[in-house]
Image (cartoon, rainbow, N blue to C red):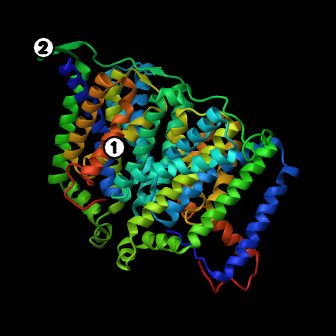
Amino acid sequence: MLQNLLTDGLVIGSVYALVSVGMTVILGVLGQINFAHGEYYMAGAFAAWWAIDRLGLSYIESIPLAILIVAVLSLVIGYVVMQRLVDVSFDAGIIATLGISLLLQNGATLLFGGTYQVFDGGWLAPMRVLGEDIAQQRILIVLVTLAVFGALEWLVRKSSFGKQMRAVAQNVECCHVLGLDVRRVVLITFILGTTLAALSGVMTAPITMNIYGAMGEAITLKSFAVIVMGGMGSIGGTLLAGWVLGIMESLVAAYVGLQFRDAVAFTLLVLVLMWRPSGFFNTKARY
Amino acid sequence: MPRFTVAGQHFAGQLASGALIIACLALFPLVASSYQLSTLIISMVFLLPALGLNLILGYAGMLSLAQMGFFGVGGYTSALLAMHFGTPFWLNFSAACLVPALLAIPLAIPALRLRHTSFVMCTIAFVFILESVSKNWVGLTRGDMGLSSVPRPRIGLWSGGFIVHTTVQYYYLGLLLCVLAVAALVTIVRSPAGRYMIAIREDEVLAASIGGRTWHYRLAAFVLSAAFAGAGGSYYVHYVTVISPSVFDPTYTNTVLVVVLGGGVGTIMGPILGGVVFIALSEVLRIAPELRMVVYGLILTTSVFLFPKGIVEPLTAVLRGAIPSRARGSHGR
């Protein structure tokens, strides 16, 4: 029973971590909270559903297509809106991304109807791991998450683009002085962050089964909790915070009551903030 | 951050224009349809928490998304009092201001240690925790079923009195509450405490260095904003006569944000104008229900770039251009 709950929590936590890390890199580079982040998760799930249901593709084919669709979508939004958010105030950024969130959420409802759609795909056959039956899709989620986090750590620490990202995160004016194309870095980071959310949406849809226009809202809010707990800007911290949240949710749902599950994220957040105001892993000053 | 300059010589003029606006609004039911009035009533429902957000964000410089949490607490307080004890409206309303304000004090202890993003997240957290409490404390709130047939506001000293039930009567009740709330906000902002809050917004370290206890003033801003939100909750619950945990839904928080930030944060007229324009807009767009929120989102995003200081900015510019005034120029914003 307990082992079951822990694996469940680990899977859900991986989903949270995968969505949140996209928001973390956007926050780090752009300095803005992306209130529409969960909507790209939703868009990823819907694009894959559309590919499977309307185009008759298989699940494996739908994954790259969904990511491509979301990348194009975020290229447009990034070009029109997000690039301009570099030098606007913190609350203007919130209202702009909130507008995008409403736009995408209700756009999806307009396109695909307000009802739940059933996502038919994925590998749901159970597999025996450590004496337990786990759906293959769940194992895949954890593996993909680990791979993505490894790749991101490498990208940010070692690659030349990662250096540019860190430079923009530290001082935008200095980057301008040095001739670094800040807008390009912001745009690419934004697309990277949103496609990670989309990947998470595509990977999770076979498990949650139902997809709907407003599904991203709860994810956005939980991502807030995860990135703050992880110490905004820390990639490893985000993974840890995602797992902690997933496992806590699964334990609370089982032992305290299902109805308390959605309050876990925020109760945990307040407790962590009281104990460590800058999150688990942040070595810098508070944001 | 937009600045609100309280120049003494302008105050009389502002008072006069305020009185003119109130007079126009008071006469509005003579010409308006019941539908237009109910739209304005919804604007006034959102104006009350918006004034609180305006105080904490526009003057003290802290973006609190907990407003609708306190709105809900105020609504539940008012509804439960009226249902169980049959108390008159003034008492329900006062309790609806007081309970969220008292609740804000313990919540402020973790929240006020934080700045910027962490503070925003912490205040979002409160709404979710309050929602969870309202869903699970079934004995008091009846959980997801919510409270229905909440009594209509009874205007009387203790027993008996007059029961508000028509749209016009609700309109006047709302107008009275909003005028009082705006007057309270103006008083707070013009007081030394208000000026100190503005100082904190501009530079907290500097404000602390002149010897004030910034923590006290930030707490005061947080508590007062909760009281404004609770006032809105009380008016709302007696108007719609039902309340359920859905009052804590992010949609409501978003609406208040739109009203304040879209209207013009840190100004008195901004949220008032924002309340009327954006709520009316969402009603006009109701003719195409599917498209409504899409257009709403589009307008929101574009308004950030077109009117970064809210719609009050271009409107005042137009008014200034239209009225050739002596005051123009000497006291810029």
Image quarter where the N terminus of chain A lies is top left
Please determine whether, in this image, residue B138 is positioned above or below residue B249.
above
Instruction: Name the foreground residue: A276 vs A222.
Output: A276
Relative image position of residue A218 (x, y in whole percent): 42, 36
Q: Helix or strand or loop: what does disc 2 sit on?
A: loop
Image quarter where the C terminus of chain A lies is bottom left
Instruction: Name the foreground residue: B173 vs A38.
Output: B173
Please determine whether, in this image, residue A274 is positioned above or below residue A47.
below
Tell me which numbered mark, 2 or 1, is placed earlier along the sequence: 2
Q: Chain of mark 1?
A: A
Residue A144 falls left or right of residue B258? left
Q: Are marks 2 and 1 in contact (CB under 8 Å)?
A: no
Please determine whether, in this image, residue A24 is positioned above or below residue B218.
above
Relative image position of residue B158 (x, y in whole percent): 72, 44
Residue A96 falls left or right of residue B32? left
Residue B159 falls left or right of residue A169? right
Question: In the image, what residue occupies the spot 68% across and 77% down?
Answer: B11
Please rate how many residues cluster around mark 2, counting C-alpha atoms within 10 Å: few if below 14, some from 14 to 19, many from 20. Answer: few
Amino acid type at circle 2 is Gly
What residue does disc 2 label? A131
Relative image position of residue A63 (x, y in whole percent): 32, 29
Q: CA distance from mark 2 to mark 1?
A: 33 Å
Question: In the image, what residue occupies the spot 19% across and 50% down?
Answer: A281
What residue does disc 1 label? A225
